[in-house]
Image (spheres, coloured by chain):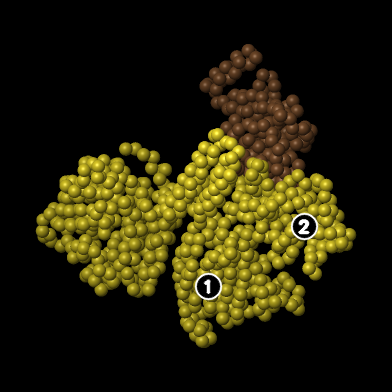
Amino acid sequence: MAQEIKNSSDQNRYHKEIDAVQYLSFTMENEEYGVDILRVQEIRSWEPVSRVPNVPYYEKGVVNLRGSIVPIIDLRERFDLKFSDYTPLTVVVVLQTRDGNRTRTMGVVVDAVSDVITIDKNKIQKAPDFGSKVSNEFIAGLTSVNERMVILLDVDKLLKLEELENHNN
Amino acid sequence: MSIDMSQFHQVFFEECFEGLDAMESGLLNLDTGDIDAEMINTIFRGAHSIKGGSGTFGFHDVADFTHVMETLLDEMRDGRRKVTQPAVDVLLGSVDCLRTMLTSIQEGESVDQAAVEKYKHALEVQLSGAAGGAPAPEQPSSRTEPEKADDEVVASEAYEMPEQGWKIAFCPYLDLLKTGNDPVRMFRELAELGDYSVSVNARDVPGLFELDPEECNLSWTLQIKGDISLQEVNEVFSWVEGDCELDIQPLTKPGKTVPAVKKIEPEPILPETGAAKTELDETEAKTGTGNPESIKQSIPQPDNDQTKSPKSSGSNSIRVDTAKIDALIDLVGEVVITQSMLGLISENFTMDQLEQLKRGLSQLERHTRDMQQSVMNIRMLPISFVFSRFPRLVHDISAKLGKKIELKLVGENTEVDKAVVELINDPLVHLIRNSLDHGIEMPADRLAEGKPETGTIELNAYHRGGHIVIEIIDDGRGLDRNKLIAKAVEKGLIAENSLLSDKQAFELIFMPGFSTAESITDISGRGVGMDVVRKNIQALGGNIEIISQLGKGTTISIHLPLTLAIIDGQSVAVGDEIYIVPLVSIIESINVTEKMLNKIAGKGEAFKLRNQYIPIIRMHEVFNVPPKDKSKPSEGVIVVVERQGALCGLFVDELLGPQQVVVKSLEANYRRVEGISGATILGDGSVALILDVPGLVRYSNRQTQLSSAA
């Protein structure tokens, strides 16, 4: 713990001197992911959703977020990780995405939120090409914090849902 | 004083567009040749306030341009210039040009300078035309109304420029401030014109206790020195005509006369920091300058306030009659009273107060319902917001086509939801263009047919049931059913020898790719329109019908729901889910017995209702909801719904009861989902989806086809 505190003060110093960005990190299946903290609207606990028919299985449904209808997306399933049951610890990170000049609010289900990390922009590594095994289209970059790899996600690409085909017919 | 002016830009633009609309309709009415001085005044005021506003906000291009318009209008107003058709056309064009300029500025784009210069030049040609020709002496004949006292001064002394300046006795009526005028601002404007001094007469000011801060008890004597025309002085006071006694005298007797045409130079109006120091600042501080007739009210969209894009902000404010706001405030007061009453009861509740509690709750319910109604009322706008654009359209297009057409507007005050108003415009424009182009014949043809030379298009709006009906009635050539059918056969849209009723034949024009016009004009006839029109209207939850008589004319009626924000719905349970079926599409709900059910080709299901076989859609299957315990239609309920005349039965587990639901957009944060038109929030805070019945039926049919093909 003490090391962590020291570390974060180190990071604060970075923050002043270098081009730094802050990310909210969370875990899924022991992997650590990060999203731009400026896109995080709030963090909520999981609550039952209203199912929406005939949409991909990872789009769990919609909830009432203070009068707005907000979709909830299971990030595990989006990434083809094994589905795990929702527990009281399961959290929903409410994110804001931009699509053209529209802003949308969406919730993503993750295992647990871990930390707010400050990252030197120059130390973000571009996502390598994993070939066809892993799609890297949502990945904004990789970085390491305390020797752990954090996968930084591109919120806009991640939550750009394919429109249903032929919906006009 | 440094204020961030950009916060007022939105209001400024709205006011400008309103002003432009007023000018446009005024100019169109001038066409008739009967010149109404009040009308010219209205147009002039529109131009003047745009000029003033744009000067204040630093849009000097706009101010300069409007200034030229204003000069021309001013001369018309004073009767120094005849109102000619070319002049009116140039002004109309300038209104368009100004609108484009304002739109560009609003969206942060650069202004098309070439177009602006073109119109500016045209205006200047109009202006110099009078100067070069006979500098038209006073033409009292062109006025139809007696002018007010101060205008007579203009008429007789307009050409006279005093050498020294003017002495102005300005004695406003008590209610001047309530009209939104602010003397301080007017004086600052005067100060811009020249060297100026003011003395105030506070004789009539009552004691502090009798003082009504909204009344203007002061009067002023102003002296202004410099080379200033009476016109310029009058301009300053042009907004307070009728609200004051005004006497403008030259400081010295006018010596020489100057030509009528004055120099065109932009004059800054309403400077934001007053150069003149007057002792009246406290008056300004005390009085509001809001216009009591209408209140600017921003109503956030209930569903997408977080997702608003900056560009769409233009249509997010609404003008509301104060009476509506007052009614709402009264209701809120009632609710507060009821709430405090309930609070009191609950504090020391005993069972014998039960009756009281119930009464209080039912009162609360009534007030809530009234409040909902009156809030919905605020969203209601008169349909004239849409209709008012059409005189111009008809004017322009009929001139282009060489047709004589009169447009009649009926029921302009019919109120309809703001969202409907915004979305109905394009379909209506299309339908009117069609009537103009295809419906009404050329004047010669009309005379040959024994019809009056001038064709009529009537736009009629009225309420019927929970709907608004908009009719477009023309007395043109009507639809030829044989021609329609022949065309449809030729295009392969229907089979030859198909028997169609008149109604069905007319409906053909709504089919994609259908156009009977022999030649495609730039006005209509590409055959992409009518199907889009129908689709748009259906998307609003309405429908469109055509009645036509060959040679007599065509009537197109559009039925639209009054509001899109709240619908009556029936909530139904399907498995663990709750869906809302819009009440308008429900015909009835019935329990069926095993005997009534029939299988079709082993897959489809139908049941017989009063000699009609109705297909059944199993909601569990269409929506992939795990069924609870009711797997047979005979165990649940069939909700019979209608889609464009065809019936269909939705099999659901049970009915949960009717309720009014507030429609929330699913697309705002999510996406369009087939068979679902929106979502709503139920009493317990959970979300229920609202079914889009036509979409659902289409989707289900396609699914069936897919599964039978597989």
Q: Which residue lies under the disc numbered 2?
A: B638
Q: How far from the left and from the top, in percent, is residue B71?
A: 29, 60
Frontmost of labels 1 and 2 is: 2
Crowding near the residue tagged with mark 1, few <14, some 14–19, many ≥20 C-alpha atoms within 10 Å: many
The chain letter for the residue carrying disc 1 is B
Name the residue furthest right.
B602
Same chain, labels 1 and 2: yes
Q: Quadrant of the rendered structure where residue B361 is?
A: top right
How far across and how far down the image is residue A101, in percent?
56, 45
Q: Residue at x 76, y 51 (%)?
A: B654
The type of residue carrying mark 2 is Ile
Above/below status of B452 relative to B177:
below
Tell me, for residue B299, which label it has, or none.
none
Residue under label 1: B436
Q: Position of residue B492 (x, y in %)?
A: 73, 72
Report the front residue among B57 and B344.
B344
* Residue appearing at x 17%, y 61% in the figure: B160
Q: Nearer the viewer, residue A71 or B139?
A: A71
Of all residues shown, which one is farthest toward the top? A2
Tell me the crowding category of disc 2: few under 14, some 14 to 19, or many 20 or more residues within 10 angstroms, Cα based. many
Q: Residue at x 25, y 69 (%)?
A: B146
> Please, which chain is the residue tagged with disc 2 on?
B
Q: Secondary structure at mark 1?
A: helix
- Residue in the foreground of this view, choosing between B114 and B517: B517
